[in-house]
Amino acid sequence: MTNGLTQKRLSGFVTLVSSLFFACAFPANGVTPLHDWSFSKEAISAQAITSVTGDLKGSFESRPVTNGFGVRFDGSTSLDVPGMTPDQLPSETVTADAWVSLDAGTRWGSIVGFYQDNGSYEKGWLLGYNDTHFVFSVSTASKLHTITSKTAFEKGKWYHVAGSFDGKSMKLYVNGVEESTGSSAVGKIAYPEKAYYTIGAYRDQDEFFRMKGIVHRVRLYGDALPATEIRSLHAEGKSVFPRGVTFSVKPHLRFDSPRSATIYWETDEPGQASCIRPGGKPAFPSGRQNEIAQPFDDPERFGTGRVVPLPHQHGFRLGYKKHRGNL
């Protein structure tokens, strides 16, 4: 089954999304975090949120937008925990983990941390990212030592990221796999006298770079969790998020006539198909809403078309004879 779409120049793209969108707060596997931030819609009241453990009060710069997965940081907001001091944070060993989907990288990106990086004064720790990869940084004297993941993150894809430090060794995990280690940081964590305990932004005394992406959960532990525990955290959490699509036949364009074409593809499993036109507007005419289902809670961004009856084959028909200008 196909949908008639129109435009003078054929453009747009098609994506598949999973049918699983509900986010839940999955428990840690036998280890209680010091701080546990679960960013469900129910947990946030106006611009405030309370941690699941630790009884911390967080404050957003502006009223956040949430969806079924977590809170969206759009580059204009972040979460700060006022009044945080070093004596409330781990002093010798630490693990920070997060479920995050990034829309963009940046030279200075932080998911969560408490730090200052001002010239030769580098103190604290952070779990974050740069333009292309995830990073974990710890200071035990006057320098933030940083290790970098092997995995280059894909924009819009969900990742479980964890960094641990046991006083002698730093480790960085992506999706349960240990990807980087470092031994430059040795001893107790060296904290700045004052800093921001921030989620969703790289923020210190003279820098403030906000995240663009979605955060589902952030946890902080007072221990350096072993690799088995990190793998368990990843395994317990990954079912919340859409699985990636595997194509048995990759998307390709077939011209049906000089004035229309169809995009075809086949996947290993059934799914929903979305056609999104440039600029993020729904791709289907308003008069055909009976053929549209919304897979996300953002109808301004997604318009979804039906798939053909065969469970693994999908197609959209593009043309411009009817509904001129709707794409």
Image: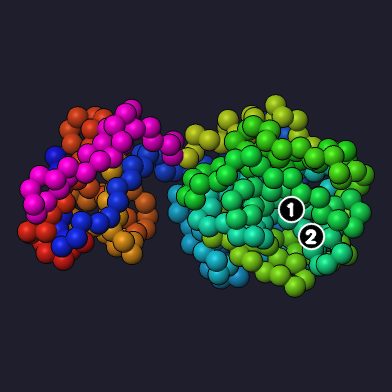
The answer to whether 235 is drawn above or below residue 91 in the figure is above
- Residue 165 covered by magenta stretch: no
x then y, percent, for residue 132: 59, 51
Horizontally, residue 103 falls left or right of residue 149, namely left
On the question of residue 71 being in view, the answer is: no
Name the residue carrying label 1.
Answer: 126
Q: Where residue 287 is drawn, which disc sits there?
A: none
- Residue 265 covered by magenta stretch: yes
On the question of residue 99 being in view, the answer is: yes
Mark 2: few, some, or many residues within 10 Å (few <14, many ≥20)?
A: many
Do callouts 1 and 2 mark residues in contact (Cβ within 8 Å)? yes
x then y, percent, for residue 87: 88, 55
> What's the residue type where badge 2 is placed?
Tyr
Horizontally, residue 281 falls left or right of residue 239, namely left
The answer to whether 41 is drawn above or below residue 164 in the figure is below
x then y, percent, for residue 162: 68, 41
**Residue depicted at 44% across the width and 43% down the height:** 22
> What's the residue type where badge 1 is placed?
Leu
**Residue depicted at 47% across the width and 40% down the height:** 241
Q: In which quarter of the image is residue 194?
A: bottom right
State the separation of the CA atoms marked 1 and 2.
7 Å
Name the residue carrying label 2.
Answer: 115
